[in-house]
Amino acid sequence: MFSKYLNSVKDNVAEISADELADKLKEKNESIHLLDVRETYEWNEEHIPNAIYIGRGCLERDVESIVPDPYDQVIVYCASGKRSALAADTLQKMGYKNVFSLDNGISGWKEQGKLVNVNMRMYSPLTKDYQ
């Protein structure tokens, strides 16, 4: 059932490749927001440079404080592209107009030889800060 549901969601979500994302990140455009929707422990291991952590479970509640303009570009990623597709679908339903899911997630990003930041500090959801 999940696969069928995911496929129906992916039909409505634009995906972006690792190369396309790398090009966008070079632009250093403030209206592009890269959101990591993985679990805290995954973020604490590594993340794509310039990403902002917002766990999938808090996305709907917290996204407006990170992306107040619904016309900004929002790119979400997870480990493989499944959770990010669901997150992108949710953001579209909330009214965000330029939403993309990273095809194959951070796994695909790394397979393409793209850089990841290994965290030196850990994010704590209890304090919503870095330690």
Image (spheres, rainbow, N blue to C red):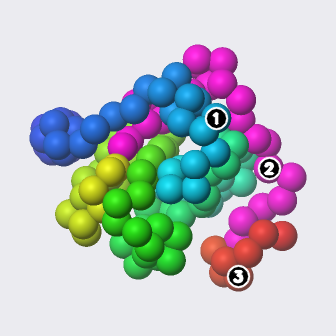
Of 62 and 66, nearer the camera is 66
Q: Are marks 3 and 2 in contact (CB under 8 Å)?
A: no
Indicate whether 23 appears above or below 50.
above
Give the quarter of the figure containing the N terminus.
top left
Q: Residue at x 13, y 41 (%)?
A: 8
Above or below, 34 relative to 70: above
Q: Secondary structure at mark 2?
A: loop
* Distance from Cα at disc 3 to Cα at disc 2: 17 Å
Q: Quadrant of the C terminus?
A: bottom right
Residue 14, by quadrant, is top left
**Residue denoted by label 1:** 26
Q: Earlier in the sequence, mark 2 or mark 1?
A: 1
Q: Position of residue 47 (x, y in %)?
A: 66, 44
Could you tell me if residue 91 is visible in this image?
Answer: no
- Crowding near pointer 3: few (<14 within 10 Å), some, many (20+)? few
According to the image, label 3 marks what residue? 127
Could you say which is closer to the camera, residue 35 or residue 1? 35
Foreground label between 2 and 1: 1
Label ID, residue 78: none
Left or right relative to 114: residue 108: left
Q: Residues within 10 Å of mark 2 (few under 14, many from 20)?
A: few
Which residues fall within the magenta stretch?
100-124
Q: What percent of the width, then of the height, locates residue 58?
A: 45, 72
Where is mark 2, residue-wise? Answer: 119
Give the amino acid type for the residue marked by disc 1 in the picture: Lys
Q: Given the image, on which type of amino acid does mark 2 rest?
A: Asn
Specify which label sits upstream in the sequence, 1 or 3: 1
The answer to whether residue 48 is above or below residue 65 is above
